[in-house]
Image (cartoon, rainbow, N blue to C red):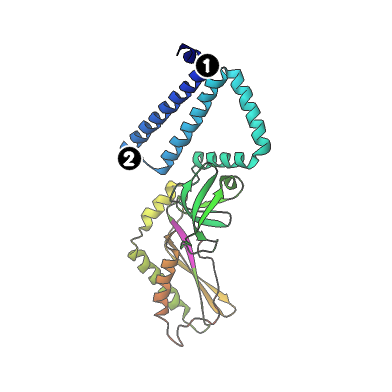
Amino acid sequence: MPDLLNNVYILKTVQSLALALVMIVMAKIIQMAATNHHKHSPEISYAIKYATIFIFTIVTLFIWLEGFERVLTALTIVAAALTIVAKEVILNFLGSFIIFWRELFAIGDRVQVGDHSGDVIDKGILFFTLLETGRKDSTGHSTGRLVKIPNAQVLTLAVINATRGAGYVWNELCLTLSRGSDWEKARQLLLDSSEEYRKKESIDLERVKQSFERKKVFFKKLDPIVYVAIATGGLDLTLRYLCRSRMIRESEDFICTRFLNSLEPGSLELAVEQTRCHHSS
């Protein structure tokens, strides 16, 4: 027994196991404290998890290498080796740090990174996972597919977050009328339909405006507006209005249905060819 206690490797193993136990208990206590203060979220769990791993790794190096200089030397050698053989892994790890530190997105946010868009359902050291909602021109419905994106992409690609602003986006709905149509009546119908949709969804424009302003985004007015332009096949009417970022298609269906029910042959008709415009902007 005394021989075992004098064995430096056994002592270091015991110290490492004790450290692991202490770190696990501390992480649990911090997690419980956050929950009791109503701050439980995937973001906090994510931070606690990786902070615990980082601290455990550093302290374990001190235990086994005995001395600050040796630790620095070991870390230098390891860093050089990893840079050569695992560049992508390092970039992904750095990307995970940027995601958390800069708060690019949280679990549940709807984001677009490069050509991929969807709802964030998981974040990790190397990858984050999206529940896909399609390509750039998608109207927001889930495809049911999961997309794992390397964290390194946030270092080089634009990250569009449709949730962090106010949860609302400007959507544009384009309709082309025949040349003989009453465009003034059509414009008013679109405005009335968008107002009806706003009331149905209980969208408080003043509250939305305040939410934008808290994010340092300022709009003079948030009321819907219809732009009129002359097109090859008739007259283009473009309705620009606010809707929830996850309700683009539903809003278009609501407004289009009411507009179509108001069409009158000879007075208010759609052109044969319709202009296409972006779903949101």
The residue most toward the bottom is 266
C-alpha distance separating marks 2 and 1? 45 Å
State the quadrant of the N terminus. Answer: top left
Residue found 63% across the figure and 42% down from its top = 88
Q: Amino acid at mark 2?
A: His
The residue indicated by pointer 2 is 38
Q: Is residue 208 above or below residue 227?
A: above
The residue indicated by pointer 1 is 8
The residue most toward the right is 84
Q: Residues within 10 Å of mark 1 (few under 14, many from 20)?
A: few
Instruction: Report x, y in % for residue 131.
Output: 48, 56
Instruction: Report x, y in % for residue 135.
Output: 55, 61
Q: Nearer the viewer, residue 89 or 180?
A: 89
Helix, strand or loop at disc 2?
A: loop
The quadrant in which residue 273 appears is bottom right
Residue bounds of the magenta highlight = 168-172
Q: Is residue 119 above or below residue 104?
A: below
Helix, strand or loop at disc 1?
A: helix
Residue found 51% across the figure and 15% down from its top = 7
